[in-house]
Image (cartoon, rainbow, N blue to C red):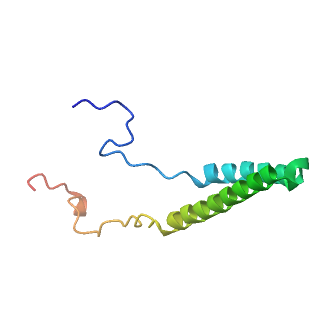
Amino acid sequence: MIQPLGNPQSPGITPQAPSPGVLQAQLAKTEGQLQDCVTCDSARTPQGQAKIQTLSLKVQSLKARLEEVRKVGDTVAAPPPVVAPPRGPSPLEGGRLDLLA
């Protein structure tokens, strides 16, 4: 069976979580839209209230996702420090090179 390229259901393809920067930008944009909606003339109409509710839920969701991404980023272990190998006898000790080793 041939699968189209870019199929999100393809095995082996895992969705990548958005970065904190992307989520922060989306949050700022949505908060701006919410502020505009709250201060507009239609804020007291049923349609305006519905839009405010939708944007408020989206802001809450984005804040939760941003916090989750930040927590996951904090729990990722840092790579272990590079440790120099222990010094043992060197083939150059005594100024000679051991060519038979």
Residue 63 found in image quarter: bottom right
Can residue 32 be seen at all in this image of the molecule? Answer: no
The residue drawn where x is 67% and y is 49% is: 26
Residue 56, percent from left and from top: 72, 59
Residue 86, percent from left and from top: 29, 70
Q: Relative to residue 29, is residue 99 drawn left or right?
A: left
Residue ranking furthest to the left: 100
Residue 68 found in image quarter: bottom right
Q: Quadrant of the N terminus?
A: top left
Q: Quadrant of the C terminus?
A: bottom left
Q: Relative to residue 32, is residue 23 drawn left or right?
A: left
Q: Is residue 37 above or below residue 91?
A: above
Q: Relative to residue 40, is residue 6 drawn left or right?
A: left
Can residue 91 be seen at all in this image of the molecule? Answer: yes
Number of on-image labels: 0
The residue drawn where x is 8% and y is 53% is: 100
Residue 76, percent from left and from top: 46, 65
Residue 84, percent from left and from top: 35, 65
Q: Is residue 47 above or below residue 60?
A: above
The residue drawn where x is 28% and y is 68% is: 87
Q: Relative to residue 80, is residue 91 drawn left or right?
A: left
Residue ranking furthest to the right: 41
